[in-house]
Image (tube, rainbow, N blue to C red):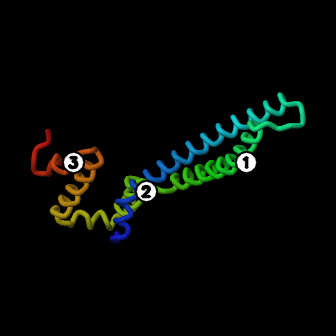
Amino acid sequence: MTESTMYWLTRLDHVHSFLNSFGCLLCLTALLTIVISVISWIVRTANEQWNRENHVDSDWKAANSILKITRPIAVLAVSLCIAVEVLTMFIPTTREMAAIKVVPALANPENCQKLKTISSDILDVTADWLKDIKGKKNGQTDGKQSNSSSPRG
């Protein structure tokens, strides 16, 4: 595994979280612009029915201009929301990417033999690093993390 692969493996949760947040903002934008468009359409339609004469009042003009502005925004927000959600489906989390990388390597019989011959010190260092990451993800601060030699309570 290269350093580049390891870097992206540790960053995937952040990328995934960013895309989820961005997608939520886009969905809220789309929802808000759709609501504004519906209200403007109702105002415009009501003014058309109530004002049977040929004059157009300021409410109708305002509703019409709001519709002209919000329609493209709503279409763009909905399109981007769908695109971001589809993109989020194809970007794995750190756990998923670790499984994608590690499981095939461990399933190979040659690698199983190599793992048995590796010094236990290297495996202990790796296990400690994984525990640190798990502690950080669970919300522990650096001062509260337990090291591998102390008993857990």
* Amino acid at the residue labelled 3: Thr
The residue wearing badge 2 is 15
Q: Secondary structure at mark 2?
A: helix
Q: Is residue 24 left or right of residue 93?
A: right
Callouts 3 and 2 close, C-beta under 8 Å: no
Q: Position of residue 104 (x, y in %)?
A: 40, 61
Pick the residue in front: 60 or 10. Answer: 60
Q: Secondary structure at mark 1?
A: helix
* Amino acid at the residue labelled 1: Lys
The residue lying at 38 percent from left, 67 percent from top is: 5
The residue wearing badge 3 is 141
Tell me the quadrant of the picture where the N terminus can be found.
bottom left
| Disc 1/disc 2 C-alpha distance (Å) | 35 Å
Within the image, what quadrant is residue 27 found in? top right
Q: Nearer the viewer, mark 1 or mark 2?
A: 1
The residue lying at 38 percent from left, 64 percent from top is: 8
Q: Is residue 49 above or below residue 27?
A: above
Q: Position of residue 118 (x, y in %)?
A: 21, 66
The residue lying at 10 percent from left, 47 percent from top is: 150
* Amino acid at the residue labelled 2: Val
Q: Position of residue 62 (x, y in %)?
A: 72, 41
Q: Position of residue 34 (x, y in %)?
A: 65, 40
Q: Is residue 96 left or right of residue 127?
A: right
The residue wearing badge 1 is 68
Within the image, what quadrant is residue 103 found in? bottom left
Mark closer to the chain start, 1 or 2: 2
Other residues around mark 2 within 10 Å, as few (<14) / some (14–19) / many (≥20):
some
The residue lying at 83 percent from left, 28 percent from top is: 50
Within the image, what quadrant is residue 139 found in? top left
Other residues around mark 1 within 10 Å, as few (<14) / some (14–19) / many (≥20):
few
